[in-house]
Image (cartoon, rainbow, N blue to C red):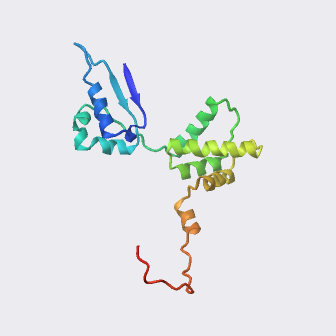
Amino acid sequence: MILIIDEAQNLSVEVLEEIRLLTNFEDSDKKLIQIILSGQVQLEEKLKLPELAQLSQRVGFSCRLIPLNYEQTKGYIENRLSVAGVVEPLFTAKAIKEIYIHSKGIPRVINIICDLALLFGFIDETREIGHTTIQEVMQELNIYTPEQLQRRHRRPRRDTDVVRDRSFRR
């Protein structure tokens, strides 16, 4: 039997300890249950806690997915569209480049950006998603590149007409 737990970084130390106890079930020649914990980077940190030393000792294999590069991101988007039945390219090359830049190659973020871009395309009744649509998606998601943040969030000048009340305390 195999037990797969996704988003395992959200489990409490107590629940992870109970999962460890499941690994004790075995018959004379093999374990009765194989457990796969899948999660974000925080799971690695959590497994380093002293309270979870016994669980960490039972980890037989661990791996980490690294972000996709541009070509992998392009292939990932094209493959997902192909599986969905799309036969013509939907995203322009410039749009895919924008998706890669904003997502930093993280598949979950790629999915979020593409899903919203496809929704925008459907609403606009367009057959091609360009970089402008991706920029609109990024504004809608409130995800900005560092350059956009600098332009967007300049510190306002202090209003010199405001008198400060020195008696106010936090």
The residue furthest right is 125
Q: Position of residue 20 (x, y in %)?
A: 28, 30
The residue furthest top is 28
Q: Position of residue 71 (x, y in %)?
A: 54, 43
**In the displayed structure image, the side of residue 116 where residue 25 appears, left or right:** left
**In the displayed structure image, the side of residue 121 where residue 109 appears, left or right:** left
Q: Is residue 134 above or below residue 158?
A: above
Q: Position of residue 150 (x, y in %)?
A: 54, 67
Q: Locate the C terminus and report the quarter of the image it occupies.
A: bottom left
- Looking at the image, which residue is at 56% across and 76% down? 156
- Looking at the image, which residue is at 35% across and 41% down? 43
Q: Position of residue 121 (x, y in %)?
A: 72, 44
- Number of labels in the image equals 0
120 or 100, nearer to the observer: 120
Asked if one can make out residue 155 in the rendered structure from this viewpoint, the answer is yes
Quarter residue 125 falls in: top right
- Looking at the image, which residue is at 26% across and 44% down? 49
Q: Is residue 22 above or below residue 113?
A: above
